[in-house]
Image (tube, rainbow, N blue to C red):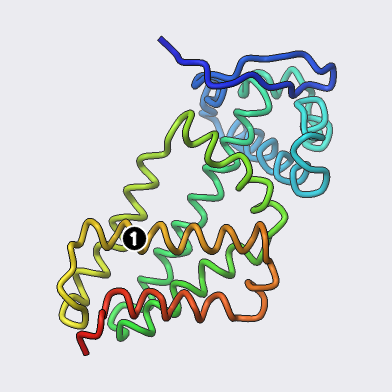
Amino acid sequence: MIRVNTRISYSCLETIFVITQESVLPRKKPVQRRSTELCATMVEATARVLRNEGYEAANTNRIAEVAGVSVGSLYQYFPGKEALVYALLERQERRQLQLLREHLGRADGSDLESLVRGAVQALVDFYREDPQLARVLAERRRYLVGLRPLPELELAFADLISAVIQRHAKQMRALDIEVATFVVQRAVDALTLEAAVRRPDFLDDGRLAEELVQLIIRYVDGGAH
């Protein structure tokens, strides 16, 4: 049985819809290149509407208009607004993961502080590129992920961080790797996201990045060196 978490109005007619786990899933997955590109266009249109007009202004009619498609085409793939926002959130999380993987791959062999500094700056830059979209998604992220988690992405982020901790263990104090991975992952994610929402100026002037680097280095070192 699917649990109903809330009720929300999101159409231009102010019709009340019940949002369930199924509400955030696409109706069908695109198979051909053309349908894949169509879905990508609709997700990008969702980003444009959220960024420029805000969450409340976003509805399926407006998103379809910005995407240049009919509402009927939109409903072939997405049951409603929340499914589009969820797809956008997943896209952004995958981009963030890819950015981190690329950085860690290039920095392989670097000392611990250089590795941490580069990874933190990459994540700060990610949020700095589009802070308005980050702010809107942040307001919906906890609810949507609570409704339907993204365990694959959560595990992928954790695996990256855990691998770094294990690879540089000799430069750190004795750590419970599972706990340390959780602490580092949540601290960086929460603080960068909060900065995007509340203090985007911290993303621009380098202060947040430096404090995050010091927080992580001092946490994993613990005065061991």
Measured from the top left, where is residue 211 in percent x and y? 49, 78
Residue extending furthest toward the bottom? 225
Q: Residue at x 56, y 69 (%)?
A: 124
Where 170 falls versus 187 (above or below)?
below
Residue extending furthest toward the front? 223
Where 27 falls versus 211 (above or below)?
above
In the rendered image, which quarter contains the N terminus?
Answer: top left
Q: Residue at x 18, y 75 (%)?
A: 169
Q: Residue at x 46, y 15 (%)?
A: 3
Q: Quadrant of residue 178?
A: bottom left
Measured from the top left, where is residue 214 in percent x and y? 42, 81
Neighbour class for label 1 at 10 Å: few (<14), some, many (≥20)? some
Measured from the top left, where is residue 113 in percent x and y? 36, 84
Q: Amino acid at mark 1?
A: Val
Measured from the top left, where is residue 147 in percent x and y? 48, 29
Give the residue number, with chain letter if any, for mark 1.
183
- Describe the element under mark 1 as helix, strand or loop: helix
